[in-house]
Amino acid sequence: MKMVKGVVWITPLGICSIIAAKIVSVTDIVLVISQLGWFIATILIGVFLSQLIILQPVYYFFVRKNPFKYYLAFTQGTVTAFATASAAAALPVNFNVLDNDLKIHSSITRFVMPIGTNINMDGTALFLASSTVFLAQMTGFNLGTGTILTIWVTSTIMSFSSASVPSAALVLVLMIVTSMGIPTKDLPLLFAIDWLVLTMNRPVRDS
């Protein structure tokens, strides 16, 4: 236990050192910041398009109810997911909403919600694919049609194995880019913005 506590305390220092070393090695910091800004914008636009353009009509088509009222009921769960950056942490809150506010039978919620928390990783799939393409473009790696399709399929499959804890997707990004032969030298750039991207899109993607 002492070893675990030691690793937890040292980890922030190690991450800061990795990020600092990468920043020092960057020749055009303004260009890199601009590219990171476009990357963040791509993630957020993709998440909101998924929520507003895809999921809302699907919900209305099958349930025939206003999806925004349904979302409003999960305000507390959304805030919890935002504060903790973890869908698993919001699970008990969502149970309470489903049982007491939406009056859905507990036999359904206790079966569906845990499964959904672990496999409803559409935002993670988006992050994995976008991160892989971003790292490839940063290093000048050639992306053909076949490569993009491979990234899409791999990211979708790998997202199912993502743990419902903060920054778990970065490990999967490393696995994907390594398996595809994409250089990982720019991966520390994602460490610097990972907390921002995941915290902002967690409430609307995986919670």
Image: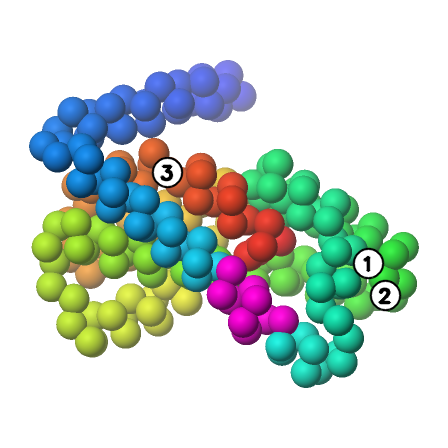
- Residue 191, given in percent of the width and then of the height, sits at 34, 36
Q: What amino acid is at disc 2?
A: Ile
Mark 1 crowd level (few <14, some 14–19, many ≥20, 10 Å Cα) = many
Spatial distance from mark 2 to mark 3, Cα to Cα?
38 Å
Q: Is residue 127 above or below residue 2?
A: below
For residue 60, the mark is: none
Q: Which residue is mark 1?
A: 98
Asked whether disc 2 touches disc 3, contact meaning CB atoms under 8 Å apart, the reply is no
- Residue 109, given in percent of the width and then of the height, sits at 78, 63
- Residue 42, given in percent of the width and then of the height, sits at 37, 56
Asked whether disc 1 touches disc 2, contact meaning CB atoms under 8 Å apart, the reply is yes
Q: Which residue is mark 2?
A: 104
Q: Which residues are magenta?
A: 48-56
Q: Identify the image's colour scheme: rainbow, by chain, secondary structure or one colour.
A: rainbow
The stretch drawn in magenta includes residue 160 = no
The stretch drawn in magenta includes residue 51 = yes
Spatial distance from mark 1 to mark 3, Cα to Cα?
33 Å
Asked whether disc 1 touches disc 3, contact meaning CB atoms under 8 Å apart, the reply is no
Kindly report the secondary structure that dominates the magenta region of the rendered protein: helix
Kind of element beneath mark 2:
loop
Q: What amino acid is at disc 3?
A: Ile
Mark 2 crowd level (few <14, some 14–19, many ≥20, 10 Å Cα) = few
Please report the residue visible at 85 percent of the width from the left and 65 percent of the height from the top: 104
Residue 165 is left or right of residue 95, and the answer is left
Residue 124 is left or right of residue 79, and the answer is left
Nearer to the camera, 64 or 80: 64
- Residue 47, given in percent of the width and then of the height, sits at 48, 59
Q: Which residue is mark 3?
A: 193
